[in-house]
Image: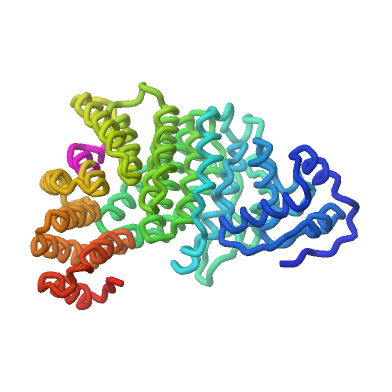
């Protein structure tokens, strides 16, 4: 990767920050390269590259934003490419930033919505980075709700601010989608947001949530993202007072988390991570601390799925610390169960059991009529039994795993079809662990059939995980029947 030649004067801003951070030229280059690797980039900068930057040359592509992130991590304060005297661009990893202001948060997340138009193969190439979990969760924990979110006449803010160079989009791409594709006239500025608009956002969220539970994240994910781009963004850039603005940011946070969840379900983990970070920031603007904790739990669950148990535990604990003991019992149960899943993945049976016991006690403390957030209502006895089943499976406590998975399936309603696939596969794995090969393969075949009817990479991966576990018995009749069923459905087990 080469840099643009420039006649600019020496970059004194960059020189000053290098001195403050205590970097050598080689040390800075090495950290930029390392951060690039986290995001799937092969940069290969060296001390000579940094010397050129100090002389005024501008690095290409995503590098200015990567350099800014290196300094942000080192110095503990948010720095942009402009702060370093560098030209900004729209980086591949845009979306991992925890914005300093609500306006910046809107610019970042709307940039993600616009970019999220590629194929699934392209989306999966956006790298997930465990290191990218640290700064947002820390900033959320120590941060507080923004003092002001109101926009429009009398609010002290312009209706439509200019986007910063980091995520600036050409005017011709900011119009609504027309018959011939992107383009068209720019959106009318200053749209006044009403309470009805907020209700519409909430209703759309419930619709897409139901589709996700029943048919998988890939079923209507792109429709959700386009709705965010063409409906939610004009509202966020519109006119509203403080109270309505908080509700607007809360609804946008929920839809953005759902966009991340559906991305996670199709295996686009880097993109999902970016949506989760931005949902967390929108929740802070909404002054909705409890929803922010839910976003962190969502991030924790993704970390478990990807095998990052330590990060999963940390995220769940940050969520617990952030809300304290004042949250509704069902929320407390959800937070403790998420921590338990992380401990289970790490093989820490004692800590896992302690977390699950806390979750169970919290759920038992819930009373009919308690005010539980709408997004937490799924966490009931069926879900808690599912959590126990997953943890016992990970700890190779197969008899307990089977008991809890069976209970969850008995209690879980048909609307949660994908969750039933997960739980049925956990039960199959538990039966396999108990030496019950034929029942295990029968259960797995049922889950396979159900997964084939969804657009969910996770559902298929659950069944493939069973296929890997049963491989030592591949010559047995039940296993051959399972593989034949997979082949008939066009689902490879390799």
Q: Is residue 375 visible?
A: no
- Say whether residue 137 is left or right of residue 418: right
Residue drawn at x 32%, y 49% as measured from the top left:
209
Q: Which residues are magenta?
A: 375-387
Q: From this viewpoint, which residue is outermost toward the top?
A: 326
Give the answer, above or below, for where 369 lies relative to 180: above
The image quarter containing residue 92 is bottom right
The image shows residue 348 at horizontal and vertical percentages of 32, 39
The image quarter containing residue 384 is top left
Magenta residue check for 379: yes
The image shows residue 226 at horizontal and vertical percentages of 46, 58
The image shows residue 424 at horizontal and vertical percentages of 17, 55
Q: Is residue 126 visible?
A: yes
Dominant secondary structure, magenta: helix
How does the figure colour the protein chain or chains?
Answer: rainbow
Please state which of residues 73 and 59 is positioned toward the viewer in this rendering: 73
How many circles with numbers are drawn on the protein? Answer: 0
Magenta residue check for 215: no
Residue drawn at x 84%, y 64% as measured from the top left:
5
The image shows residue 319 at horizontal and vertical percentages of 42, 33
Please state which of residues 77 and 174 is positioned toward the viewer in this rendering: 77
Indicate the quadrant containing the N terminus: top left, top right, bottom left or bottom right. Answer: bottom right
Please state which of residues 161 and 239 is positioned toward the viewer in this rendering: 161
Give the answer, above or below, for where 452 lies relative to 427: below
Indicate the quadrant containing the C terminus: top left, top right, bottom left or bottom right. Answer: bottom left
Residue drawn at x 42%, y 46% as measured from the top left:
257
């Amino acid at each position: 990767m080469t840099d643009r030649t420039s006649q600019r004067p020496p970059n004194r801003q960059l020189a000053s920050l290098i001195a403050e951070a205590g970097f050598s030229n080689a040390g800075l280059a090495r950290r930029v390269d390392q951060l690039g690797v986290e995001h799937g980039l092969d940069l290969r900068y060296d001390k000579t590259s940094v010397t050129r930057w100090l002389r005024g040359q501008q690095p290409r592509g995503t590098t200015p934003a990567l350099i800014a992130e290196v300094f942000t991590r080192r110095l503990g304060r948010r720095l942009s490419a402009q702060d370093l005297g560098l030209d900004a661009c729209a980086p591949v990893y845009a979306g991992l930033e925890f914005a300093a202001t609500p306006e910046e948060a809107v610019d970042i997340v709307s940039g993600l919505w616009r970019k999220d138009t590629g194929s699934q193969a392209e989306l999966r190439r956006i790298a997930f980075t465990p290191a990218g979990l640290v700064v947002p969760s820390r900033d959320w924990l120590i941060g507080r709700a923004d003092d002001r979110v109101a926009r429009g006449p009398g609010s002290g803010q312009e209706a439509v601010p200019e986007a910063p160079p980091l995520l600036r989009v050409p005017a011709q791409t900011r119009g609504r989608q027309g018959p011939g594709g992107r383009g068209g006239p720019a959106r009318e500025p200053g749209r006044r947001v009403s309470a009805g608009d907020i209700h519409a956002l909430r209703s759309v969220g419930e619709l897409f949530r139901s589709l996700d539970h029943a048919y998988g994240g890939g079923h209507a994910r792109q429709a959700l993202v386009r709705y965010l781009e063409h409906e939610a963004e004009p509202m966020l850039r519109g006119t509203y007072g403080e109270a309505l603005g908080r509700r607007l940011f809360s609804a946008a946070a929920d839809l953005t988390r759902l966009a991340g969840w559906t991305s996670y379900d199709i295996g686009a983990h880097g993109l999902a991570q970016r949506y989760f970070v931005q949902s967390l920031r929108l929740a802070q603007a909404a002054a909705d601390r409890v929803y922010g904790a839910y976003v962190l739990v969502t991030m924790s669950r993704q970390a478990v799925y990807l095998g990052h148990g330590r990060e999963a535990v940390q995220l769940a604990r940050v969520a617990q610390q952030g809300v304290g003991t004042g949250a509704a019992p069902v929320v407390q149960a959800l937070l403790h169960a998420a921590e338990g899943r992380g401990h289970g993945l790490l093989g820490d049976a004692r800590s896992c059991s302690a977390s699950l016991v806390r979750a169970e006690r919290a759920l038992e403390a819930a009373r009919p009529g308690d005010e539980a957030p709408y997004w937490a209502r799924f966490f009931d006895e069926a879900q808690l039994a599912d959590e126990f089943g997953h943890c016992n499976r990970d700890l190779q406590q197969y008899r307990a795993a089977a008991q809890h998975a069976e209970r969850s399936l008995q209690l879980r309603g048909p609307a949660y079809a994908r969750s039933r696939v997960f739980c049925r596969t956990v039960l199959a794995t538990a039966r396999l662990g108990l030496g019950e090969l034929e029942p295990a393969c029968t259960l797995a075949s049922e889950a396979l059939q159900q997964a084939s009817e969804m657009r969910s990479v996770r559902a298929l991966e659950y069944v493939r995980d069973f296929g890997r576990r049963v491989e030592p018995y591949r010559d047995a009749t039940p296993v051959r029947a399972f593989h034949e069923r997979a082949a008939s459905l066009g689902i490879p087990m390799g």
